[in-house]
Amino acid sequence: MSQQYKVKGTDGNEYGPVSTEELHQWIAQNRCTRDSLVEADGSGEWVPIATLPEFHGALASSPSTSEPATPKADSGVSTLIPYKNTSALIAYYLGVFCIICPPILCIPALILGIKGLRNARENPEAKGTAHAWIGILSGSFFLILSIVVSVMIAINA
C-alpha cells in the first residue's frame, strides 16, 4: 500500500488523503509546488514537499521550478495613480482642493499625506510618495496662509 498524504492548499484548506503517485501527478500539473505543505500518514507534522526525498525528482522536472518566478509588470499606472496607497491619493486631492476652502481640508491633507508617505516608505510597491508630499506641502501652505489672512483680518477689524 502506498503512503498517503494530506496537502494544505494556498486557500488554507486540506486536500487528501492522496497517494504518492497522485501527488506526483499534482506536481506535474503545477497543483503543488516546492513550498506546498504536506502531512504524511497523519503524522500531524506539516512540512514543505521539497523536504521529502520521494518528491525530489518530480520537483526537479516540474515546470514551476525550472523557470524563475517573474513578478507581474506594473505598467506604470500605479506611479501616476497610486491606487495601492489611498492615503497619499486622498491627501493629494485634498491638498489641491485646499485652494477652495483651506481651513477645512488642510488638516486632513496633512494627516493623510504623512500617513501616505509612511505607507510608501514601508511598502515601496504602493508608490504615492509624490502624491503624499503634494498633500503635505499644499495642506501646510494653505493652512498657514489661512491663519495669516485670519490674523490680518482680525488686526484690521
Image (tube, rainbow, N blue to C red):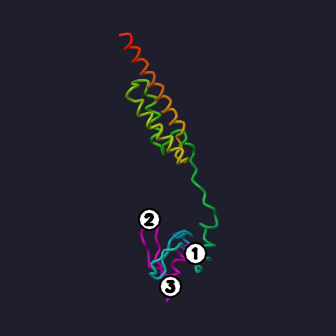
Q: Gap between marks 3 and 1, in whole Å?
A: 16 Å
Q: Gap between marks 2 and 3, in whole Å?
A: 24 Å
Residue under pointer 2 = 11
Image-based side of 99 in relation to 58, left or right: left
The reply to whether the magenta stretch includes residue 17 is: yes
Q: Secondary structure at mark 2?
A: loop
Question: Which numbered dot is residue 3?
Answer: 3
Dots 2, 3 in contact, CB < 8 A: no
- Image quadrant containing the C terminus: top left
The residue under label 2 is which amino acid type?
Asp
The residue under label 1 is which amino acid type?
Thr
* First to last magenta residue range: 1-27
Q: Secondary structure at mark 1?
A: helix
Q: Earlier in the sequence, mark 1 or mark 2?
A: 2
Number of marks: 3
Which dot, 3 or 1, sits closer to the camera? 1
Q: Position of residue 106 (x, y in %)?
A: 42, 29
The reply to whether the magenta stretch includes residue 66 is: no
Dots 3, 1 in contact, CB < 8 A: no
At horizontal 53% and vertical 48% (from top left) the residue drawn is: 123
Image-based side of 79 in relation to 103, left or right: right
At horizontal 54% and vertical 39% (from top left) the residue drawn is: 129
At horizontal 44% and vertical 38% (from top left) the residue drawn is: 112
The residue under label 3 is which amino acid type?
Gln
Residue under pointer 1 = 51
Q: Earlier in the sequence, mark 3 or mark 1?
A: 3
- Neighbours of disc 1 within 10 Å: few (<14), some (14-19), many (20+): few
